[in-house]
Image (tube, rainbow, N blue to C red):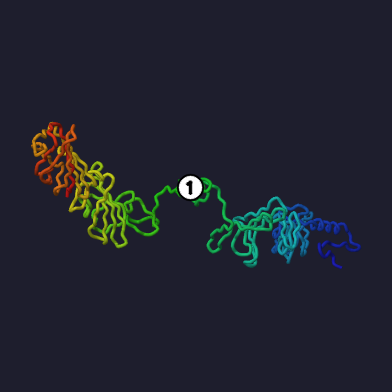
Amino acid sequence: MPDTTPNLAMPYILPAQAQKHVTHNEALQIIDAAAQLCVEAIGQNTPPETAQNGQVWAIGAAPTGLWTGQSGKLAIHAGNGWLFVPAQEGWRAWDRATATLQVRQAGDWAQLPMDQLSGLGIGTGSDAVNRLAVASQASLFSHDGAGHQLKINKAAPIDTASLLFQTGWSGRAEMGLAGNDAFAIKVSADGAAWSEALGTVPATGQLRFPAGALLPGGTAVDPALGFDGDGGTGLFSPAAHQIGLSTGGVARAVVTDTALQLSVPVTGTAVTQSASDTTAGRLLKVGDFGIGASLLLADFTQDIAPGVYTYQEATAVGAPGSGAAFSGSAIVSKATSGGCVIIAARLASGADIRFWHGRRTTATGPVLWTEMLHQARVVGTVAQTAGLPTGAVIERGTNANGNFTRFADGTQICWRDLAAPSLAVTTARGALFTNSSLTVPSFPMAFVGAPLVTLRGGFAASADGWLTMNGSPTTTALTNGVLRAFSAVALTEEFRWGYTAIGRWF
């Protein structure tokens, strides 16, 4: 029979042994140290200089001094010496130095193994699905000197690696990789019907909003959708049914359901690039084609782009008018034949406004001008060049020789009313009486040929008397013959008479 027990190496009390209490007490010391084992340190090779009775050390692999040859054993300070107990496989000890629970395994001490546990419940029970279950007010995962990662791994893209948020054990939100490798956030109102609120494109990092996104209204200074590092730049909604765009905290564009308000000039290829840019679809800038800021046209015989122009009548080549020092404006449109149509106007002075219509059937060359009449030129001075009217439609005037009216077609009417206060119609001529003669008046305006004259005359107080003319009128005077008054009786009184002459002035 061995002298010590197999596990704690406590000495047996032998038959007829003297001083049995010594052996018994040694065994009690070993039990006292090994039961609920607590060691001062593990792996120590040098005995401490001082020790209290009952303190225990787990000896390391190369002990020295009084511990020499006791590697791997427990050193128990007992009285004035040491008891050495072999540490057995599976013993557990609390290590004061590291404040950890150590287990003897494979001839060495190690912390209590936590690997390959079938489950762990903290404050609650785990199960086959929820192998780690925690019931607490919070869970803390902190760093160990630097960062910390919480890793959720899945086997294949079609599997799920996500965080599920529940209310009453019913799902309300889920974030992670659900059925694919694109990170997404899904939400549910009842745990049955789910909507994807946020999705991602793994290859580019772009975000998707399958259900749309609702933003606050924001302001121009603090837009609802902005840009990192560029405050006051983004989108906002100043009122219902309105979208605004701001830069630098100032609203630059606002779209409503009835209008688009722009507060900056429009530039780029969306607008015309030059004064004669005809690219389809581009917006017209002020000044292009003369809109809002007329272009100066120096030559009407050149190939002119459509637009609004100004010109100087005295210097512009091929301009309409007499070449006077007047300014004019012209609107040019292109003809399908390559020529152009021009409407030109100029203000000479006062209300003397003149308009011309011009056309050219080729890209370059002289313009055929035709002056247009308008309200201000119906009555005025008539004129013509080579039979083509160049002035007003009607000219009405009066001078010392009478009244006249001229028409643009060349027709001229002159008339005059005269009176001889005491005309003596007393010279017998057969059965009638006549006067000696009446003064032959000049026409107020000359004719180009002898006009057709109609005479009228009679006494102021008598029904008897008439006027006759001997001879033909000239272009400047009523007649080259004699005007006489006749009466059936001899009379001396006021004789009233006149004429109307109709002819042409050109």
- Can residue 218 be spotted in the picture? yes
* Residue 499 falls left or right of residue 272: left
Give SS at disc 1.
strand
Q: Residues within 10 Å of mark 1 (few under 14, many from 20)?
A: many
Q: Nearer the viewer, residue 367 or 460?
A: 460
Where does label 1 land, which residue? 232
From the top left corner, tell me how far across and down residue 343 is, in percent.
28, 52
Number of numbered tags placed on the structure image: 1
**Relative to the observer, which residue lies in front, 411 or 176?**
411
Name the amino acid, label 1: Gly
User: What's the residue at 65%, 67% (across, down)?
Assistant: 155
Image quadrant assignment for residue 148: bottom right
- In the picture as drawn, the residue positioned furthest to the right comes out as 16
Q: On the rendered structure, is 151 left or right of 57?
A: left
Nearest to the observer: residue 263 or residue 150: 263
Q: Position of residue 82 (x, y in %)?
A: 77, 58
Q: Position of residue 244 (x, y in %)?
A: 49, 49
Of residue 296 and residue 448, the one placed in the foreground of this image is 448
Can you say whether 490 is above or below 276 in the image?
above
